[in-house]
Each structure stands twice: as structure tokens, then as C-alpha cells.
Image (cartoon, grey):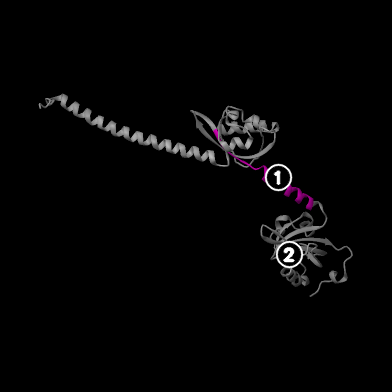
């Protein structure tokens, strides 16, 4: 069989160079196909992740929603097609719309806004959902946009409001109400407690109840801490607390053990004794 004539001369170098370039292009094509497969796998992983997380995730551009994940839709009671291209500002309570609009404009312009503020969003069923967002400036389709992660804190806010209301109620009573750990360290004190002893809340929190007891009552106080009452009505005793300036405050104290999150505490109420007994008025030792 006859062999084709071998190309000679300057054209031979060009043909040989073309063959090498073709081989390089074929190798590059294989690498690009591998990279394309890797990118598709990464996209699938990212998509699966953002669709399975419990937190809302939305992309907002020019104050309109251009994408939102499944959790973000469910949180507000909408389907994706109902939120797509919808104004994010219209989803928040009317009283907060101007503030949210300004916030979006600042973030999209590049300002760094500290997280922490809660926003009341209105669900499709017209309920209020309190949301805590974390927003960042990104570039989408060549333009600035905002990527927002958001959490439903409605129940958490209810608990905080209830605790705040209880604390306000406790601060409105004239009796001293305080909570001790089992070693006597003051974990909570209402306004009547710390003001009657001349302290601030920060000063008295962390002090030990023995420290505010008159010297002659400290031993008894330590004994009661070791054998606290677990009866519902609590145990009652009379003692003397010391004001920050050293003056004496005779009180009648009732306290009992309560359990919170598998930890025991002593909840106590102290009432000033108006007609003091002589034994309480006279310092000993």
C-alpha cells in the first residue's frame, strides 16, 4: 500500500504546529467538560442546601424579590410565583415600610448595617410574623442587590414580652422579690429589692445574700441555704438586711425552692417589718 507523500518545506512546520494546537484544544475541551460537570454538581449541592434549610433566604434588587427559597416562602405563607417580582417593602407592616425602604437603599448602596432589628412582616393570611434579618450587598446580573437571611422569631419575641411584663409587674410591687442559686448568689432582684438596700441592679446581681445580711444573722442564713423549704407556701423567717450605707433593714422573708431547666433556685419575697421586734433592732456581737 502506498504511503501518502510526506509534506516538506515550511508548510510541514505549520501542519505540525496545527496538530499540536488541535491536541491542546482537545485536552482543554476535556477539562472544560469536567469543569462544567463540577459546576453543575456544585450548583445542585447549593440548590439542595438552600431549599432544605429552615431559614428564609431571599435576593432583593431594587426593593423587589427576584428569588426566595422554600423556607422563606413558607414562613410568609406564599408560593414562589406569588413572591417573585413582588415589592419586599409591601410585605412589612405599613408603619415600618419607610424605614425598611431606607434600610434597603443604604445596604444596596454599600453601607454596612448592623443586624439585630426585628421587622413585623405580614403573612398571606394577614398574621404578623416577627423576623430577624441579616442582609448583605451582592452583585446580581451586573447590578447591586441584597442577599437576606431571615429567621422567624415570633415565639421568641412573645416569650421576651411576657418576661418583660412579669419583670415590670415585679418592679411595681413594694415587696422585695429575688432569686438565688443554691449557694445564695443573687441571680435576679426586683426594683424594690435593690433600691431598698441602696444598690443598682448591676451591683446587687451576683452578690451573695449572706453579704447583705447583718453579721449576727449570717450563720442562720447559711444554714437555711443548705436546708431550703420545698413546700409550696415556702418557709418564713425574720432577719435583718444591711443597706449599702450600713443601716439595718428588718425583714420577714418567705422563700422556697423552684426548678427551672433542671436546675434548682430559691425564690424569695422579703417584706419590711414595720413594727420591729427589739431583738431585730439591736445589733449583736
Vertical placement of 163 versus 254: above or below? above
User: What element does badge 2 sit on?
Assistant: loop
The residue most toward the right is 275
List x then y, in percent, for residue 221: 75, 69
| Residue corresponding to mark 1 | 158
Task: Say which of marks 1 and 2 sits in front.
Answer: 1
List x then y, in percent, for residue 252: 83, 64
Quadrant position of the C terminus in the picture: bottom right
Vertical placement of 197 versus 107: above or below? below
Q: Earlier in the sequence, mark 1 or mark 2?
A: 1
Determine whether, in the image, residue 157 is placed left or right of residue 177. Answer: left
What residue is shown at x 89% (from left), y 65% (from top)? 275
Q: Please, what is the dominant secondary structure of the magenta stretch?
A: helix
The residue most toward the front is 1
- Is 156 covered by the magenta stretch? yes
The answer to which image quadrant residue 211 occupies is bottom right
| Residue corresponding to mark 2 | 209
What residue is shown at x 88% (from left), y 69% (from top)? 277
Mark 1 residue crowding within 10 angstroms, few (<14) / some (14–19) / many (20+): few
Measure how far apart labels 1 and 2 are at the Cα level: 32 Å
Amino acid at each position: 500500500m502506498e504511503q501518502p507523500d510526506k509534506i516538506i518545506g515550511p508548510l510541514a512546520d505549520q501542519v505540525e504546529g496545527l496538530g499540536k494546537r488541535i491536541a491542546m484544544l482537545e485536552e482543554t475541551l476535556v477539562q472544560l467538560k469536567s469543569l462544567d460537570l463540577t459546576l453543575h454538581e456544585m450548583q445542585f449541592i447549593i440548590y439542595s442546601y438552600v431549599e432544605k434549610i429552615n431559614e428564609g433566604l431571599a435576593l432583593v434588587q431594587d426593593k423587589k424579590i427576584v428569588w426566595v427559597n422554600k423556607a422563606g416562602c413558607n414562613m410568609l405563607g406564599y408560593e414562589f410565583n406569588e413572591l417573585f417580582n413582588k415589592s419586599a417593602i409591601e410585605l412589612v407592616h405599613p408603619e415600618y415600610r419607610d424605614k425598611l425602604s431606607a434600610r434597603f437603599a443604604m445596604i444596596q448602596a454599600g453601607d454596612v448595617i448592623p443586624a439585630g432589628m426585628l421587622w413585623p412582616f405580614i403573612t398571606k393570611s394577614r398574621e404578623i410574623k416577627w423576623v430577624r434579618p441579616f442582609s448583605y450587598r451582592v452583585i446580581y446580573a451586573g447590578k447591586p442587590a441584597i442577599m437576606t437571611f431571615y429567621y422567624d422569631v415570633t415565639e421568641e419575641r412573645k416569650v421576651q414580652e411576657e418576661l418583660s411584663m412579669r419583670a415590670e409587674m415585679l418592679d411595681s410591687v413594694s415587696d422585695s422579690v429575688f432569686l438565688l442559686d443554691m449557694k445564695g448568689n443573687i441571680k435576679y432582684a426586683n426594683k424594690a429589692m435593690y433600691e431598698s438596700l441602696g444598690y443598682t441592679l448591676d451591683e446587687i446581681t451576683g452578690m451573695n445574700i449572706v453579704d447583705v445580711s447583718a453579721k449576727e444573722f449570717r450563720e442562720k442564713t447559711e444554714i437555711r441555704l443548705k436546708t431550703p423549704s420545698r413546700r409550696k407556701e415556702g418557709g418564713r423567717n425574720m432577719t435583718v438586711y444591711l443597706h449599702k450605707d450600713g443601716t439595718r433593714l428588718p425583714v420577714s422573708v418567705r422563700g422556697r425552692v423552684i426548678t427551672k431547666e433542671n436546675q434548682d433556685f430559691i425564690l424569695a419575697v422579703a417584706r419590711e417589718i414595720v413594727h420591729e421586734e427589739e431583738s431585730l433592732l439591736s445589733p449583736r456581737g
